Image: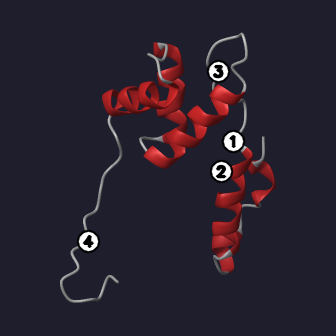
Amino acid sequence: MRGGSGVEEIRLGPLSRAEVTKQAAALAGEPVPTDVIGELYVWAEGNPFFTEQLVSAALGGAAGGGLRVPAGLPGRLAHLLAARADRCRGDAQAVPPSGLEG
């Protein structure tokens, strides 16, 4: 589609910390503690998809103990990144995907 006539590509930068705070609160259905936002922001680097996956995993492990960012990457996110790495060629595959799962 990129080369099609009438198609305009819009490159988006990463979300700001304030935007991650709003996104996480919307996903969680409640305000998210500042320390959790800090972890989300560091882990996801402003990437809204990564933030969504991390919040989803945090909600999955929140039974009775509050929202907690998982110690490792959520399985779905780890598999997505591993699949992307598998499509790379040569030196781009130098880092083994085995360390992605948490």
In the rendered image, the vertical position of residue 34 relative to residue 88, given as above or below = above
Disc tally is 4
Q: Is residue 16 left or right of residue 67?
A: left
Does label 4 or label 2 sit earlier along the sequence?
4
For label 3, the residue is: 68
Which amino acid type is marked by label 3?
A: Arg
For label 2, the residue is: 77
Name the element at disc 3. Answer: loop
Which amino acid type is marked by label 1?
A: Leu
For label 4, the residue is: 9
Instruction: Kindly check if marks 4 and 2 are in contact, taking CB atoms under 8 A apart as contact.
Output: no
Instruction: Kindly check if marks 1 and 3 are in contact, taking CB atoms under 8 A apart as contact.
Output: no
Q: Is residue 13 left or right of residue 37?
A: left
Does label 2 or label 3 sit earlier along the sequence?
3
Residue 55's disc is none
Residue with the most extreme right position: 98
- Label 4, label 2: how far apart the Cα atoms are: 25 Å
Name the element at disc 2. Answer: helix
Which residue is depicted at the point 53% across and 45% down? Answer: 50
Instruction: Kindly check if marks 2 and 3 are in contact, taking CB atoms under 8 A apart as contact.
Output: no
Indicate the position of residue 32 as horizontal and vertical percent values. 48, 17
Does label 1 or label 4 sit earlier along the sequence?
4
In the rendered image, the vertical position of residue 62 relative to residue 58, given as above or below = above
For label 1, the residue is: 73
- Label 2, label 1: how far apart the Cα atoms are: 6 Å
